[in-house]
Image: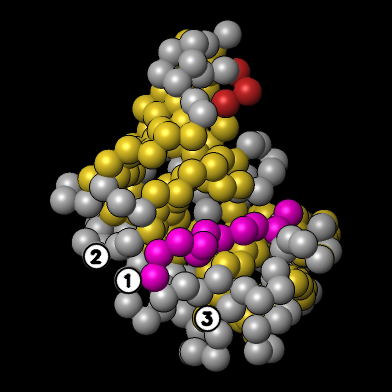
């Protein structure tokens, strides 16, 4: 089992719809969770971080964390063509190394 | 500088040559990561440095790949006897270690695009 798993997509949604991106992780005691956005040809950039169970909202973005299910998701409301990118889930492991592990990303396409 | 700096931004090399890629992390960041990203693919973890601890080298694909870091500053990734399959973007990221939660996100450099011809 991979440490951080994401569906590679592409996930296609119409403009204005809600895009839902999902991620599961294997380290049960992970504490910190991140969503990064990567445009084609660019480096990943952090868009959301979440540390506690429940929802965290920032503008059109909502991160959701369920530690019991080892599941973290990102919702993008009112999707725009400019949201088309690859979204990477990242998890900071527990233990001495405190390493951040990335999933392989989900490609999102917002259709005008 | 304010961000993670990588050099060179582009490198074209002949098959069989050695290359050295450089990463300057954000000042004060004890953690440093190297990733490889082939065209259209996800991030492939290579190596992780955390302060003075032994690095996590579990992602290095072969003994042609090595990396060093002096203290908590600059890191170099060396690829010996380059092969065409080494062509990719090599990304460096740094973060605070953080014994708890918060302020531990990784920040990425702009990458080095390596082309082996």
- Mark 1, residues whose alpha carbon is within 10 Å: few (<14), some, or many (≥20)? some
In this figure, which residue is indicated by the disc labeled 3?
B50
In this figure, which residue is indicated by the disc labeled 1?
A94
Is residue A53 placed above or below B67 in the rendered structure?
above
Chain identifier of the residue bearing label 1 in the image? A
Q: Could you tell me which quadrant the N terminus of chain A lies in?
A: bottom left
Residue sitting nearer the eye, A4 or A10: A4
Query: Where's residue B32, x and y in %?
Result: 59, 73
**Circles 2 and 1: CB distance less than 8 Å?**
yes
Residue displayed at 65% across by 83% down: B72
SS for dot 3: strand
Classified by dominant secondary structure, the portion drawn in magenta counts as: loop
Residue sitting nearer the eye, B111 or A95: A95
Q: Is residue A105 visible?
A: yes
- Mark 2, residues whose alpha carbon is within 10 Å: few (<14), some, or many (≥20)? few
In this figure, which residue is indicated by the disc labeled 2?
A29
Is residue A109 placed above or below B29 in the rendered structure?
above
């Amino acid at each position: 089992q991979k440490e951080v798993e994401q569906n590679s997509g592409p996930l296609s949604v119409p403009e204005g719809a809600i895009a839902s991106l999902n991620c599961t992780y294997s380290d049960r005691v992970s504490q910190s969770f991140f969503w990064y956005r990567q445009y084609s040809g660019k480096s990943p950039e952090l868009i959301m971080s979440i540390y506690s169970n429940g929802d965290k909202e920032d503008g059109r973005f909502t991160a959701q964390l369920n530690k019991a299910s080892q599941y973290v998701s990102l919702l993008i409301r009112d999707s725009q063509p400019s949201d088309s990118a690859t979204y990477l889930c990242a998890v900071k492991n527990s233990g001495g190394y405190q390493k951040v592990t990335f999933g392989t990303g989900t490609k999102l396409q917002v259709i005008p | 500088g304010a961000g993670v700096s990588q050099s060179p931004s582009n490198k074209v090399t002949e098959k069989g040559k050695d290359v050295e890629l450089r990463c300057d992390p954000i000042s004060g960041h004890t953690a440093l990561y190297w990733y490889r990203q082939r065209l259209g693919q996800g991030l492939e973890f290579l190596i992780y440095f955390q302060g003075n601890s032994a690095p996590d080298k579990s992602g290095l694909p072969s003994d042609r790949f090595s990396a060093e870091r002096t203290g908590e500053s600059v890191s170099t990734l060396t690829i010996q006897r380059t092969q065409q399959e080494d062509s990719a973007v090599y990304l460096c990221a740094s973060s605070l270690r953080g014994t708890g939660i918060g302020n531990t996100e990784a920040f990425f450099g702009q990458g080095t695009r390596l082309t082996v011809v």
